[in-house]
Image (cartoon, rainbow, N blue to C red):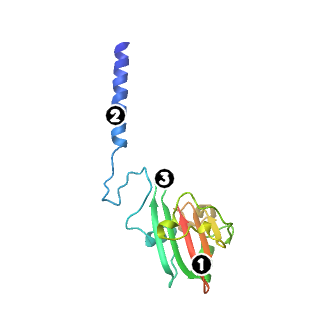
Amino acid sequence: MNTQRMVRTRLFAALAGALLLTSCSTADADDPHVTDRRTSHWGKGVGAPEASAFMKVKVPEGATEVKGAVQVNPQEDVYLLSFVTDWKNAEQIAADLRSETPLHPKKYDLPPTTELFGHLGLTEPQTLKGVRWAGVCPPCVSDQRRSEVAWIETYVHSQAQGKARVYLKAF
């Protein structure tokens, strides 16, 4: 009986050691395609084009201050896209997302616990007064164009001279 206990203890120790070795392996920091999948980080060399492609949102011709990023996360990545365009284009982009509720005023919220748009040098949209918001689950509204996207939020904030800054966040 004592021998069986020693064998089980050794097997358990060997299994635990193997698991520890494989779970603690580190990623190659120079390779942007390799991550350790345990922490969030900002994707290197990815920005507005990749975010736009993921969301299937076309940045309007003539848009300015186009910015984007991808936050790589252990479970699901977050895609950010922002630009300034005329108010009509901003409204059309929001409508094209097919939200069940159109853009509507968003109450001023406390700053989020993590900065996302701050990474792009922008104020977090949910903290802006007068911002309008809409959110949608593309698969829930049968938007086949965006079947890989679980959720998209859009914030539209009025700017001077009939312009608006559009903020899009998707995962």
Quick check: 153 left or right of 21?
right
**C-beta proximity under 8 Å, tags 2 and 3:** no
* Secondary structure category for the residue under label 3: loop
Label 2 – label 3 distance at C-alpha: 25 Å
Q: Which of marks 2 and 3 is nearer the N terminus?
A: 2
Q: Earlier in the sequence, mark 3 or mark 1?
A: 3
* Secondary structure category for the residue under label 1: helix
Q: Position of residue 120 (x, y in %)?
A: 47, 69
Quick check: 159 left or right of 72?
right
Q: Say which residue label 2 marks.
A: 17
Q: Say which residue label 1 marks.
A: 90
Q: Which residue ends up furthest to the top in the rendered image?
A: 1
Q: Position of residue 23 (x, y in %)?
A: 37, 42
Kindly indicate the quadrant of the structure image that contains residue 166: bottom right
Local crowd size for mark 3, using a 10 Å CA cut-off: few (<14), some (14–19), many (≥20): few
In the image shown, does 95 or 17 lie closer to the viewer?
A: 17
Residue 40 sits above or below residue 160 on the image: above
Local crowd size for mark 1, using a 10 Å CA cut-off: few (<14), some (14–19), many (≥20): many
Q: Which of marks 1 and 2 is nearer the N terminus?
A: 2
Label 1 – label 2 distance at C-alpha: 55 Å
Kindly indicate the quadrant of the structure image that contains residue 129: bottom right
Q: Where is residue 10 in the image (x, y as percent from the top left)?
A: 33, 24
Q: Which residue is drawn at 38% across and 18% down?
A: 5
Q: Say which residue label 3 marks.
A: 75
Local crowd size for mark 2, using a 10 Å CA cut-off: few (<14), some (14–19), many (≥20): few
Q: What amino acid type is highlighted by mark number 3? A: Gln
Q: What amino acid type is highlighted by mark number 2? A: Gly
Q: Position of residue 27 (x, y in %)?
A: 33, 52
In the image shown, does 48 or 7 lie closer to the viewer?
A: 48
In the image shown, does 107 or 21 lie closer to the viewer?
A: 107
**C-beta proximity under 8 Å, tags 1 and 2:** no
